Image (tube, rainbow, N blue to C red):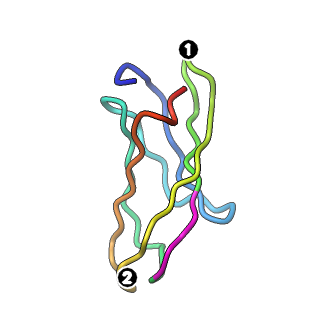
Amino acid sequence: PATATGTVAFMAGGLTLGVGTLSGGSAAITTSALAVGIHALSAEYSGDASRRPSSAAVTVSGAKRGAMASITVTGALLG
């Protein structure tokens, strides 16, 4: 929901790629840490006063070496 607050940590293999703050129901990061290929990530929502913490799988494709990737999660994660 657009009213959710908190943060979303984007994780790859146990490493934190970045943490995005929710704004309008979405959180995003930009990273150059992903190599070429498809990556299975997790997005971990911190929760807020009205919503419990949760997590969801995210699949991202890295276009080229050293390129910046923008990763956004919206809605479904914010139980």
Residue hosting label 2: 66
Residue hosting label 1: 49
Find residue 35 and report its horizontal and vertical position in percent: 48, 81
Asked if 9 appears above or below 37 in the picture, the reply is above
Q: Residue at x 37, y 48 (%)?
A: 28
Find residue 71 and report its horizontal and vertical position in percent: 39, 56
Asked if 63 appears above or below 9 in the picture, the reply is below
Q: Quadrant of residue 39?
A: bottom right
Nearer to me, 33 or 60: 60
Q: Residues within 10 Å of mark 2 (few under 14, many from 20)?
A: few
Residues drawn in magenta: 37-41
Labelled disc at residue 73? none
Q: Residue at x 61, y 41 (%)?
A: 55
The Cα–Cα distance between marks 2 and 1, rounded to whole angstroms, is 38 Å
Asked if 21 appears above or below 6 in the picture, the reply is below
Which of the image's four quarters has the N terminus? top left
Label 1 residue SS: loop
Q: Residue at x 52, y 60 (%)?
A: 17
Q: Residues within 10 Å of mark 1 (few under 14, many from 20)?
A: few
User: On the picture, is 36 further left or further right than 12?
Assistant: left
Circle 2: residue type: Gly
Q: Residue furthest right?
A: 14
Circle 1: residue type: Ala
Asked if 71 appears above or below 40 in the picture, the reply is above
Lower position in the chain sequence, tag 2 or tag 1? 1
Nearer to me, 2 or 29: 2
Magenta stretch: residue 32 in it?
no
Magenta segment main secondary structure = strand
Which of the image's four quarters has the C terminus? top right
Magenta stretch: residue 40 in it?
yes
User: On the picture, is 24 further left or further right than 11?
Assistant: left
Find residue 73 and report its horizontal and vertical position in percent: 42, 45
